[in-house]
Image (cartoon, rainbow, N blue to C red):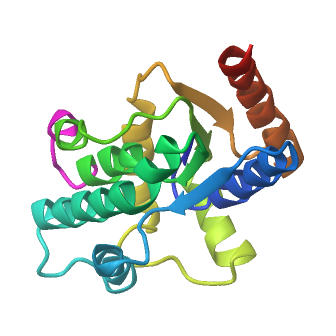
Amino acid sequence: MVFEGIDGAGKTTQALLLKEKLEALGLETVYVKEPTSGRWGRKIREIAQKGRAGISAEEELHYFILDREEDVRENIAPALAESKVVIADRYFYSTIAYQSALGLAPEEIRAKNARFPAPDLVFLLEISPEQSQIRITGNRREGANLGYEQVDFLRTVKAKFDELTDRNIVRLDGGRPIELVADQVWAEVEARLAELYC
């Protein structure tokens, strides 16, 4: 299962709430977050903080692919092989939205990610770029980073998320209270678990 959306949408909050609920039921759960803290993830985080001066969109995409490749090999694939539930805080849908917002073709980005495991459910938490800024600068008590969180860029990213039509995507209003969003997430997960275990 994957949580997606623009920055500040509540992905981490909802992912961790779901993990807690699944573990309370006795289901082994693995939480992963992209970009990772690995070598390539650190390069991406540096872009986030300092901006992308001197780094092409293609080079940046390559960092994301290498970071995901490592994450799948070391964390996601082993967990799936052991029938654990994997919860991802961002995955290749973010790469499609953010990197196509830089001018790369969405279908080409998708093709480069085709070898990675497809999630059963993708929760796309939708908020406006303006809400994003309020959460980033208010709730998180920090400024918007240069690489990914500027409001004009997030408007383009949101438009790219809006274009996604994958059948596994469940769109939720990320502006609603945390508990209500969590209830909606759980309703979808519960239905999916019923399919798997009945």
Q: Is residue 52 above or below residue 99?
A: below
Which residue sits at x=70%, y=49%?
28
Question: Measured from the top left, where is residue 160 in percent x and y?
Answer: 36, 39
Within the magenta stretch, is there residue 103?
yes
Which residue sits at x=65%, y=56%?
131
Quadrant of the rendering where the N terminus is positioned: top right
Q: Is residue 115 visible?
A: yes
Question: Measured from the top left, where is residue 43 in percent x and y?
Answer: 28, 80
Which residue sits at x=72%, y=20%?
197
Task: Decide which of 191, 147 is in the foreground and name it.
Answer: 191
Q: How many marks?
A: 0
Query: Outermost residue, front direction?
Result: 82
Within the magenta stretch, is there residue 25?
no
Quadrant of the rendering where the C terminus is positioned: top right
Is 116 on the left or on the right of 23, as rendered? left
Is 97 on the left or on the right of 170, as rendered? left
Q: Is residue 9 visible?
A: no
Q: Is residue 95 above or below residue 191?
A: below
- Extent of the magenta region: 101-108
Is 20 on the left or on the right of 63, as rendered? right
Q: Is residue 176 above or below residue 11?
A: above
Q: Quadrant of residue 59?
A: bottom left
Question: Measured from the top left, where is residue 19 in percent x and y?
Answer: 73, 52
Which residue sits at x=24%, y=57%?
65
Task: Decide which of 125, 40 is in the foreground and name it.
Answer: 40
Question: Measured from the top left, where is residue 159 in percent x and y?
Answer: 40, 39
Task: Decide which of 87, 165 is in the foreground and name it.
Answer: 87
Q: Is residue 31 above or below residue 50?
A: above
